[in-house]
Amino acid sequence: MAQNSENSTNQDNFQLTSGGDSSLDLPRLKGTIGPDVVDIRRLYSELGCFTYDPGFVATASCSSELTYIDGEQGILLHRGYPIQQLAANSTFTEVAYLLLNGELPNSSELSNFEGQLSNYSMIHDQLTRLFSGFRRDAHPMAIMVGVVGALSAFYHDSLDINDPQHRMVASYRLIAKMPTIAAMAYKYSIGQPFMYPRNALTYPENFLYMMFGVPTEEFEVSPVLAKAIDRIFILHADHEQNASTSTVRLAGSSGANPFACIAAGIACLWGPAHGGANEAVLAMLEEVGSVNHIPEFIDRAKDRDDPFRLMGFGHRVYKNYDPRAAVLRESAHAVLEELGVRDEPLLELAMELERIALEDEYFVERKLFPNVDFYSGIIFRAMGIPVSMFTVLFALARTVGWIAQWKEMIEDPDQRIGRPRQLYTGPVERNYVAMDQRS
Ligand code: SDX
């Protein structure tokens, strides 16, 4: 938890003066690494004013021990472990355990955790009927929002957020069922029967089996694909207080059940400025079409009157290369090679687009670099994942981070219902005007 300097010997506070003679000492809170924060909890009661920070650019909404990002250096740590090391050496289920419990598991802890996930990987059979209420061409994210929210209608024995056992079971259920629901959304969209999970398969293998297996024949999961998708899941697991994680925390702060909170996170992630960007990158690359069209699109991205943005570029926090994008960029060639995809024109186009953008003053000045979404879609596509499923896979992986952040919030003694204020700019009080008095 954040150390309150009010209890420390060096009274290292911030002094806020409001122009007149009134001033206020605001405590400086220190974390283990990263920027200190100004504790403004007494600001309104003492000075009668709010802070103003649309988009929460400079606002810490909580203290957390899960993930640390240094945007200037391009650093990402999960419980202190660099993302590059986790991507190279760990597995998604091991990273899930780490985020949930704070330490890397030993072998028996990991196999017990993975066994639990296997046991929770099926969904209530009545839930399968929910899918038939959707059009076959529904966006799979629409199905994910609906079906994940509906889990709260079935698992009444894990809805009590104040019961640690309920919280743990709900966490396992969500992590375990997301691949099953995601694969079902895909199968539903192509009119194929649902595939049930198989406990003998690993987490990534099971997902690929449920996505691409059919009941009529055996399906051998490619170890190359399984390793590639597992690494991509690791890179998407958690990312501090991003928009969808903040949505999950805000929903959870009212006491809403975890299934409803994760459904809220899925809804927020869907936006093209957030998790929907991986799908939008593919659409953009296909629109660009060829290297000689790149300058035209770079100009459009720079034109304030043109809503076009370079999707997969820029980030609220990273003002350096997103370390996840760097891992994906490196592994893209390797994965495509292993998949036997010799020349992927979209990858060559993406790399040329990146090269040109990173030499352009507009992007350099604004420190706009590729983010996690810039390369992920190219790898997904090479793996045979349809574009409409890209953000679903992001949500599948981020469920680990969402539920770990939700659990941390529920267990945080400082947490209370989230309820921001505003700067009111509307009309002052006025009297009602009868219809016959109106112009
Ligand atoms: C994710 O927060 C997270 O951690 C998110 C995420 C996670 O793991 O959870 O990392 C996942 O959401 C990654 C981001 C995916 N989104 C995109 O790739 C969409 C394209 N990017 C932009 O929409 C934008 O960069 C954001 C939304 C990512 C960040 O927006 P900010 O922080 O509000 O920045 P901004 O819009 O204020 O931009 C600052 C300037 C502006 O120009 P000026 O007004 O200074 O002239 O940079 C420009 C913007 O116009 N700009 C871009 C741009 N991104 C920012 N110009 C062209 N193309 C872009 N992509």
Image: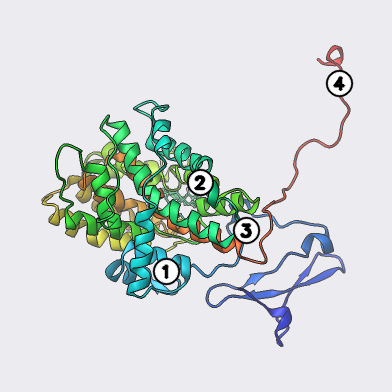
> Is residue 5 in view?
yes
Decide which of tag 1 and tag 4 comes sooner along the chain: 1
Q: Which residue is mark 3?
A: 162
Q: Using the rendered view, name the quadrant where residue 324 is placed.
A: bottom left
Q: Which callout, 3 or 2, points at the residue further toward the start of the chain?
A: 2
Kindly give the residue lying farthest to the bottom in the view shown. Answer: 9
Give the residue at mark 4: 433
Left or right for 353, reference 62: left
- The percent coordinates of residue 70 (x first, y second) are 47, 69
What quarter of the picture does the N terminus occupy?
A: bottom right
Of tags 1 and 2, the one toward the viewer is 2
Secondary structure type for disc 3: loop
- SS for dot 2: loop
Along the line of sight, which residue is nearer the eye, 255 or 342?
255
Disc 2: which residue: 155
Residue 73 is situated, as x and y percent measured from the top left of the image, at 42, 70
**10 Å crowding of disc 3: few (<14), some (14-19), many (20+):** few
Q: Residue at x 50, y 55 (%)?
A: 242
**Of label 1 and label 2, which has the lower sequence position?**
1
Is the residue under label 2 in contact with that under label 3 (CB below 8 Å)? Answer: no
Spatial distance from mark 2 to mark 4, Cα to Cα? 51 Å
- 233 and 242: which is toward the camera: 233
For badge 2, the amino acid type reads Tyr
- Assign a secondary structure to mark 1: helix
Q: Earlier in the sequence, mark 1 or mark 3?
A: 1
Which label sits in the foreground, 3 or 4?
Answer: 3
**Residue 11, quarter of picture:** bottom right
Q: Return the residue at label 1.
A: 98
- Visible residue check, residue 323: no
* For residue 415, side relative to residue 334 (left or right): right
Disc 3 marks which amino acid? Asn
Between the residue at mark 1 and the residue at mark 3, the CA separation in whole angstroms equals 22 Å
